[in-house]
Amino acid sequence: MFQYKVKSNPGNETYMNILAETEDQLFIHIVTFKEGYEVEKRETMPRKLFDTCLRTGYLTPLKSSVLAVPKSA
């Protein structure tokens, strides 16, 4: 599974996992941590949008697949 940090508002941390992919679409899981709670979403993303987000720095790959999205207690 590929994991990315999403550029987000100050005080928030957002991570994105790619669950599956086709030629044109990515199936993603997004987790946002803000103000003591977390918001989880599952969505699809066009591959062209994903490529643009990587190119512009909106998405940053995490250094290692060992790193996991933090879970709240």
Image (tube, grey):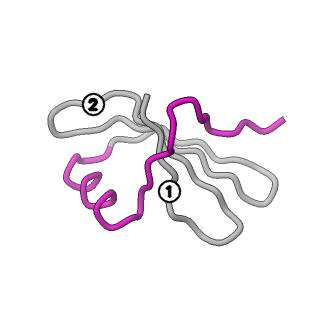
Q: Say above or below: 33 vs 21.
A: below
User: Which residue is pictured at 26% across the width and 56% down the height?
Assistant: 49
Residue sticking out furthest to the front: 63
Mark 1 or mark 2, earlier in chain? 1
Residue 21's disc number: 2
Q: Amino acid at mark 2?
A: Glu
* Residue 1 included in the magenta stretch of the image: no
Q: Could you tell me residue 56's position as x and y percent? A: 32, 67
Left or right? Give the position of 15 relative to 43. Answer: right
Taking depth in this image into account, of 17 and 27 the one nearest to the observer is 17
How busy is the neighbourhood of tag 1: few (under 14 within 10 Å), some, or many (20 plus)? many
Q: Is residue 57 found inside the magenta-colored segment of the image?
A: yes
Which segment is the magenta one?
45-73
Secondary structure, mark 2, is strand
Residue at horizontal 72%, vertical 36%?
71
Location of the N terminus (image quadrant):
top left
Q: Is residue 25 left or right of residue 59?
A: left
Q: Residue 62: give x, y in percent of width and height.
A: 50, 45
| Image coords of residue 65 (percent x, y) | 50, 31
Identify residue for label 1.
6
Label 2: how many Cα within 10 Å (few below 14, some 14–19, many 20+): some
Res 9 quadrant in image:
bottom right
Q: How many numbered dots are placed on residues in this image?
A: 2
Marks 1/2: CA distance?
19 Å
